[in-house]
Image: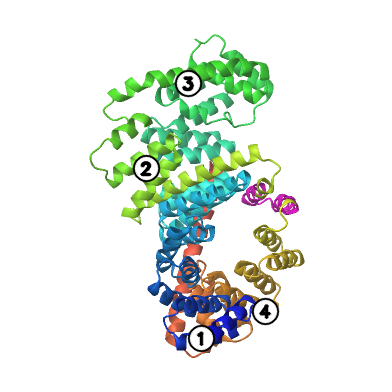
Amino acid sequence: MAAHFQAGLQALQSGQYVRAIDEYKAVLLLDPARVEAHVNLGLAYHSLREYELAVAEFDKALRENPSIPGASLFAGIDYLKLGLSATAIAPLEAALRVQPSNREAKRVLAACYLDQDEYRNAAEQFRSLSSLESDQAEALYVLGRSYLDLVQHLADRLSQRHQNTAWANRLAGDLVGESLRLADATKLYRRALALDPSQPEVHASLGKIYLVLGKLEAAEEQFQSALKLDPQNEQALLGLAEIHLVNGVPRAALVNIERIWQIYPPFLRHQPGFPSMKLRPEWLHKLATDLEGVEDTPAKRFLIFSLSSVAGEEEKVRTQVARVEHDFATWQEKHKRRAEALADPCGWHEYSACVDRLKSAKEQTVSSSLILGKALFSLRNDSAAADTFAEVLSKDQHNVAAMYWLARAYKQLADRLATRLIEQFPDSARAHQFRAESSLLRESYDDAINEYQASIRLRSSDPEMLEELSEVYLHKKLFTEADRELKKAIELDPTRARSLYLLGRSRLSQHRDRESVPYLQQALRMQPGLLEAHAALGQAYMRLKQPIRAVPELERAAAIDSHGNLYYLLYVAYRNLGKNDLARKALARSRELRKGLVAEHQASTTEIFEDEIH
């Protein structure tokens, strides 16, 4: 038995996994309870991507000794690869009890929590991972990217499960609007309002988009609609103030600023781009001059400061900034007594008093928790806001409002970390990578390529960066360049399933279908749950006229079909195989999805036409 065990160990260490399996099986025939043999046999199976066989051995070892960190870790990893994230959580938590700083266990556990929609637990693991980084730039980037992963997950959940809700369209509008795709944002906000016209924030957001587009009448209409629903809406009041400035009526703008000052002045501190519209310096100077005869108030000082900042009048800015900061500090001291006297501080946008009132309540309902989270979000206490919204979702996983606000809180956290990264480490590899990702959001692909290349020069051993660059090349149909970067990524990390999938997709895009198959098969051996690879492999098999091999791949990938294309391929495959009932069902589902797309296109066309009228 000792000889077999030693031979198995040597085979495992030298990469001879099949031989290792034979040796450890021999050990277990002699001693079925030998824990180390089960662990090492599991590792051999893991190395051969035989994940089901691997977890069976790890589970046997853990029944004998639950505190083996290696067995717990690899059991969790392999359960996740098999798409069993719920089952993976327990062994990963056990691994961390033994090794609290194990980064891989934390990373995989975060992915499992995320897959199970346990957002608070996922965020906790992401923060813990970031705290282990000694490189501060890396820590900022990793945590910011993790928050963006949470945002993307929530956006996907909303679009997949709650597509026809105002909240799903509102979040999509927010995200594309921030990436400067203003026409798309306009359509999404209008769609959200068609589904639910009672959300003042959506009216204000749409008004802001119209303002940027220079459609002042349409913008004013939306801001007024927002104020009818919520007279305290700061964004709508600020939007109207900007319209008055564009129209050359600074005193009317001042009235709106005064109103915001009465409601919640800190809102103004987070509007560094106000006024956002491009105004000539001489026009800005005229606006400031027109205010000279008006009584000196905090609102006036803020407006003069904002106009001077945009005009680039540095001396005037320096003289005003201290006074404006003093005004904010004075307000902070005085407003608390007023807020405490209000019967409904939340309705009056007295956010601090609202938080205190709700936290002191004996019982929190879902409704009051949402109000609490929104108040914390407005106070820019994003971590506490996120925890509050995540707690709502733990009780009501289909609460679309909580999903929306949780995504907004995580996005705000990510934005803050990105700002810190750029300010503190502007020439770091991660800063270049962040700028590349920002360029992608704006669809500025050449800028993204330049930034990725700059990042790779500083961090050439990072396969993820090479992978991301390759995806930009694929988008531009630069297949030679994409393949070059993907091969570099695989040389650095031969286990990267996504890189292998992208190599297969590259071949498929070039109609080199037979060449794509080995890459896609290898990607799925490493990550069986990679649905995009199943879809691509099914498509490759259909092109190669192998419907019997295509069907199981397309069936696995059907969950991600939003256009009806995969179901249509399934229809063709079933028909070729004589499975007529299944073919009819697949065709019906394909038509259903395509019909939804046509309706969406028609709605978008109508929205564009109406938008042009505005």
Instruction: State the CA–CA distance, disc 4 to disc 3.
Output: 64 Å
Kindly report which numbered mark, 1 or 2, lies closer to the viewer in this rendering: 1
- Considering the numbered disc 2 on the image, is that residue within a helix, a strand or a loop? loop
Front residue of 186/93: it is 93
Lower position in the chain sequence, tag 1 or tag 2: 1
Residue 8 in the image: state x and y as whole percent: 57, 82
Dot 4 amino acid type:
Asp
- Considering the numbered disc 3 on the image, is that residue within a helix, a strand or a loop? helix
Within-10-Å neighbours for mark 3: few <14, some 14–19, many 20+ = some
Residue highlighted by disc 1: 1
Residue highlighted by disc 4: 513
Say above or below: 595 vs 525. above
Instruction: State the CA–CA distance, disc 3 to disc 1.
Output: 77 Å
Magenta stretch?
A: 434-457
Front residue of 168/243: it is 168
Kindly report which numbered mark, 2 or 4, lies closer to the viewer in this rendering: 4
Dot 3 amino acid type:
Phe
Lower position in the chain sequence, tag 2 or tag 3: 2
Dot 2 amino acid type:
Ser
The image's mark for residue 403 is none
Residue highlighted by disc 2: 198
Residue 418 in the image: state x and y as whole percent: 59, 43
Residue 493: in magenta span: no
